[in-house]
Amino acid sequence: MPELHFTKGHGTGNDFVLFLDPDGEVNLTPSQLAAIADRHFGVGGDGVIRAVRSKNLADGAAALAEDDAAEWFMDYHNADGSPSEMCGNGIRVYARYLIENGLVSLGQGETLAIGTRGGVRDLQRNSNGFQVDLGRWSLDGGEPLVRAKNLQVARPGLGISVGNPHVVVALSSEDELESADLSFIPHLDPQPIDGANVEFVVPLEPLVRDGVGHIRMRVHERGSGETLSCGTGAAAAALATRYWAGQSAPDNWKVELPGGTLGVRMWPAEDGEHVSLSGPAELVFEGDLTV
């Protein structure tokens, strides 16, 4: 059985197992990926990221067609082995991994293009780590009813896409936020065909301080369960809160998660409004395992 050299990394506690396969020769099955991510019998993580050159992966062809600078593709899989379109924390950790291994360089003011199943994403360095342009967002997925264990009644959610699907639910208090048992999968009615990440959000008091919005959230990630942080989920939560708050709401947000704080910013672009995510990215240890 082959040996795999891996690196463990995280972004605000959202943790990943990364490995290098530039030529696209290591094709692990969903069960093998899930075994790597298993916290008891494997390395443990919310997902597994394969670093592969876009030209050597079928999904990478679309990335290169979109932007020929997207040399590297983030082949991301959830903890259950299922593929995912994007991961906002994961792509920052992936950028750090590529840089630390000498595979790319990224100076101040420069942009790094990375291919994902959700499209090409551009990253830059900032004072807190990395900022990634998540691209154009959209209201997508309607307003399904959401039921979660320990929440007494179903709540309306708001469907938002930031390259992957989310449903954001507003709660009335931090006590409600803490009481939700997200070890159980929230039930959505109607249920999206491909599932969705579900974010539970409360506004902080005051909601806006010095022109910046402040919210707190927890998340149940599709294919991974509750995680300490979700980058695209933080963006979706900020977008939903701004939508509910109305036209006077700010375009800059701080989102508090169990694993730390992430920054979200919205701005107009030629193809519609974009949203970006900023936060830290850490590599914590390396090792070898048999797969």
Image (cartoon, grey):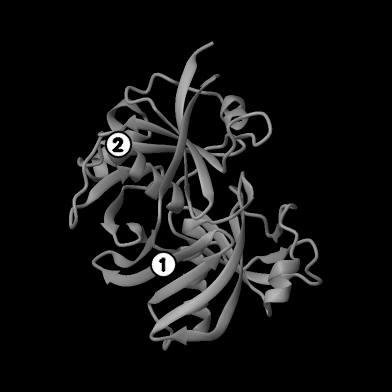
Examine the rendered structure and indicate whether residue 208 appears above or below residue 163.
Answer: below
* Residue 147 visible in the shown view: yes
User: Where does the image place residue 240, in percent across and percent down from the top left?
Assistant: 51, 72
Residue 104 vertical position relative to residue 112 in the rendered view, above or below: above
> In the rendered view of the protein, which quadrant contains the N terminus?
top right
Which corner quadrant holds the C terminus? Answer: top right
Is residue 118 visible in the rendered image? The answer is no
Front residue of 286/116: it is: 286
* Secondary-structure class at tag 1: strand
Question: On the image, numbered disc 2 is attached to which residue?
Answer: 72
* Element assignment for label 2: strand
Question: Residue 207 location in percent, x, y?
Answer: 51, 84
In the visual, does 98 lie left or right of 182?
Answer: left
Name the residue tied to disc 1. Answer: 263
How far is the residue under mark 2 from the one under mark 1? Answer: 25 Å
Quarter of the figure with residue 204: bottom right
Q: Position of residue 198 (x, y in %)?
A: 61, 59
Q: Is residue 99 above or below residue 279?
A: above
The residue type indicated by label 1 comes to: Gly
Residue at 38% in and 42% down: 94
Q: Nearer the viewer, residue 252 or 194?
A: 252
Name the disc covering residue 81, or none: none
